[in-house]
Each structure stands twice: as structure tokens, then as C-alpha cells.
Image (cartoon, rainbow, N blue to C red):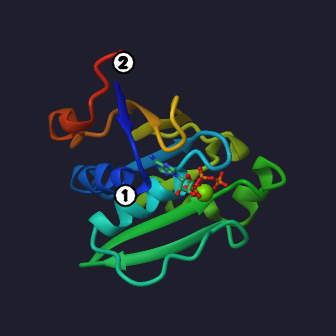
Amino acid sequence: MVFETHSETDTMAFASRLAPMLAPGDTVLLMGDLGAGKSVLARGIARGMGVTGPMPSPTFTLMVPYEAGGRKLYHYDLYRLSDPDEYYAAGLDEFVGGDGVALVEWPQMAELDVAPALNITLTRGAEDDARRIEIENDGVAGFDPAALSDWRDADGV
Ligand SMILES: Nc1ncnc2c1ncn2[C@@H]1O[C@H](COP(=O)(O)OP(=O)(O)OP(=O)(O)O)[C@@H](O)[C@H]1O
Ligand SMILES: [Mg+2]
């Protein structure tokens, strides 16, 4: 399923619609090049879940936990992971498929293969601020594509 956004604000709005579809134990795997918009999408989901205040980048800490309205959220960025063993050695696997929602940038660095998950791939579009957002749902029970129809890319598959 393919969607298209045309600005950072647009991607934030798109992401906030995903928030109510996610339940504890669900994971969102965010794939795409540097600057594709993975962090923007992650922030939009967090805001949609009610997270307020600053959202520091998890680039160096690898994971930043949040709690909003009694719901837990874990934001990962595994770009700087040296190898998958480090992910397990640091106990980072505990919060994926656990008691909250996990948002994971660069999941391929830990060779993550988890479900239920939304596998999201972001790519740049023809214009500077256009982004193509491809979503493959692997078992997320609450996923509701109809709620995202405003962004459906008519040329997508
Ligand atoms: N439609 C769009 N959606 C999201 N971001 C956009 C869009 N158009 C332009 N941008 C810009 O693209 C950049 C996306 O940055 P972001 O940090 O989210 O990328 P990233 O995929 O997380 O990269 P990294 O791999 O470095 O973590 C921001 O500067 C944002 O303003
Ligand atoms: Mg990022």
C-alpha cells in the first residue's frame, strides 16, 4: 500500500493517524535512506499518542522511552549499532514486541524480523518535499488503511 506526502507537516499529520491503530506489542519498522523522513514519521506517531515535550534523537543512546496517558512508547535508531549482537547484549530487544509500541529506525542493523509489525519504507519523490510511504502490514490488528485514504497515491500499488 503506497501513500504520498508533500511536506514534513503533511508526514506528521499522516503519522498521527497511524497512532490510534497501534497497540502494546506492535512494532513499526522504519526503512529508508538518510533524510528520508523516518524520524519525522516517528515523531508524528509519538505526538499522535500524546507524547509532548522534546523528543531527542536516539542516534547515540539507540533508544529513548516515552510514556503518555499510561501507554508506553520506545523510539529506536539503530544506525550506529556496530552489529546485531550489540543489540541483544545491551538488552534492547526487551522493548520490541513488549509492553509498549516500538518505533525502530534502521531495523536492518539488528537484522530485526518481528511481528506484529508495520513495515514502512520511505523514499523521496519527484519534488524536493515529496515522500513516498509504502506500508506492508504484518499482523497489526488495528491497522486501518481507510483512515489514511487522504494520502493514497493513485499511481501506487
Ligand atoms: N514530505 C516530507 N516528509 C518528511 N520529511 C520531509 C518531507 N519533505 C521534506 N522533509 C525533510 O526531510 C528531512 C527528514 O529528516 P529525518 O530526520 O526524518 O530523516 P530520517 O529518515 O530519520 O534520517 P536518518 O536516517 O538520518 O535518521 C527533514 O529535514 C524534513 O524537513
Ligand atoms: Mg532519523
The amino acid on which the numbered mark 2 sits, given as a three-letter code, is: Gly
Q: Identify the residue at horizontal 79%, vertical 52% (top origin).
A: 85
Between residue 98 and residue 82, name the one nearer to us: 82
- Find numbered disc 2 in the image and state the secondary structure of the residue it sits on: loop
Which residue bears the numbered disc 1? 9
Coordinates of residue 21 in the picture (x, y in percent)? 23, 49
The amino acid on which the numbered mark 1 sits, given as a three-letter code, is: Thr
Between residue 109 and residue 100, name the one nearer to us: 109
Say whether residue 14 is left or right of residue 76: left
Say whether residue 144 is left or right of residue 7: left
Which residue bears the numbered disc 2? 156
Between residue 124 and residue 41, name the one nearer to us: 124
Q: CA distance from mark 2 to mark 1?
A: 21 Å
Q: Residue furthest right?
A: 82
Check the picture and name the quadrant holding the N terminus.
top left
The answer, for residue 112, to whether it is visible in the render is: yes
Coordinates of residue 94 in the picture (x, y in percent)? 55, 62
